[in-house]
Amino acid sequence: MQRRVVFRGKLLPYLLLAPQLAVTLMFFFWPAGQAIWQSLHREDPFGLSSRFVGIDNFTAVLADPSYLHSLGVTAAFSVAVTVLAAAPSLLLAVMADRVLRGATLYKTVLLAPYAVAPAVAGVLWLFLFNPGIGIVAYGLRWLGIDWNYLLDGTQALALVVIAAAWKQISYNFLFFLAGLQSIPKSLLEAASIDGAGESRRFWTIVLPLLSPTAFFLLVVDIVYAFFDTFGIVHAVTAGGPAKATEILVYKVFYDGVVALDLGGSAAQSVILMVIVIALTAVQFRFVERRVHYG
């Protein structure tokens, strides 16, 4: 029988929690509170004076056609990034789980893109698809596709989606691979003995057991698409052409830093935070029902 270790000092638990609580307060609650306060005020561009306006900033933002356009762009962008980041990463994880020789090198190469900064990832794809010097753009023109993302908004959106999804594939691959390796091999062997083919084993055993991992990555990928793709959009298209790639997080930056609309930018950031929290809550409320734990 093991004896439980009890700390007699009542102050120790609070001291151990203090660093994490300080980081959370400083980098989450304080900026969030500051954004809410600014969203209720109208400030001059230099921040020297402010006037309380209530919900006027929110009303102006929600009535702005350009903001509604950015909302639609963000919805399409986030769905595309989530799908394109999840499907290839699952396929690569399944393939990597079968590799016997050179498995370490194979996995290391697949994890390398996650170490690349978003802005750098954007620049890499920018060079590949550059209408003048890009090798991929040259191949597209050879196939008869008039590629010029600088003028075509649909092509520009496709480019940033590809760059953002490529950056996230490594992260998804790591978790999918860990989930596959945690599945008991005895289950797959028993199913194989019973006559289940490889495809049937995947759909009836592997995929249900991977559902907790897939649900976690769904939440993470949506948050990633809404927030962490700013560097890619800023480096590749800067929201253009004609605001075709201006997602919500980039519009918050542009209106606040470039247009100096501090109150409106703060209101947009609060709305963006509410949208992401609501989407996460909906996923936990409805999507998690289909997740099989154990």
Image (cartoon, helix red, strand yellow):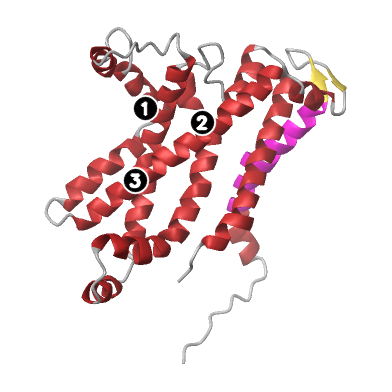
Q: Is residue 220 visible?
A: yes
Q: Position of residue 91 (x, y in %)?
A: 30, 48
In the visual, does 270 lie left or right of 50? left
**Which residue appears at 74% of the width and 37% of the height?**
33
Which residue is labeled 2 in the image? 77
- The residue type indicated by label 1 comes to Ala
Q: Which residues are magenta?
A: 20-40
Q: Nearer the viewer, mark 3 or mark 1?
A: 3
**Label 2 residue SS:** helix
Which comes before the other along the chain, label 1 or label 2? Answer: 2
Q: Which quadrant holds the C terminus?
A: bottom left
Which residue is labeled 3 in the image? 89
Q: Residues within 10 Å of mark 2 (few under 14, many from 20)?
A: many
Which comes before the other along the chain, label 3 or label 2? Answer: 2
- The residue type indicated by label 3 comes to Ser
**Label 3 residue SS:** helix
* Separation of residues labelled 3 and 2 (CA atoms): 18 Å
- The residue type indicated by label 2 comes to Phe
Q: Position of residue 8 (x, y in %)?
A: 63, 76
**Which residue appears at 53% of the width and 48% of the height?**
219
Which comes before the other along the chain, label 3 or label 1? Answer: 3
Residue 268 falls inside the magenta stretch: no
Q: Majority secondary structure of the magenta segment? A: helix
Residue contact between numbered discs 1 and 2, judged by CB atoms under 8 Å? no
Residue 204 location, quadrant: bottom left
Residue 32 location, quadrant: top right
Q: Kindly identify which numbered label has been placed on residue 121.
A: 1
**Which residue appears at 41% of the width and 13% of the height?**
149
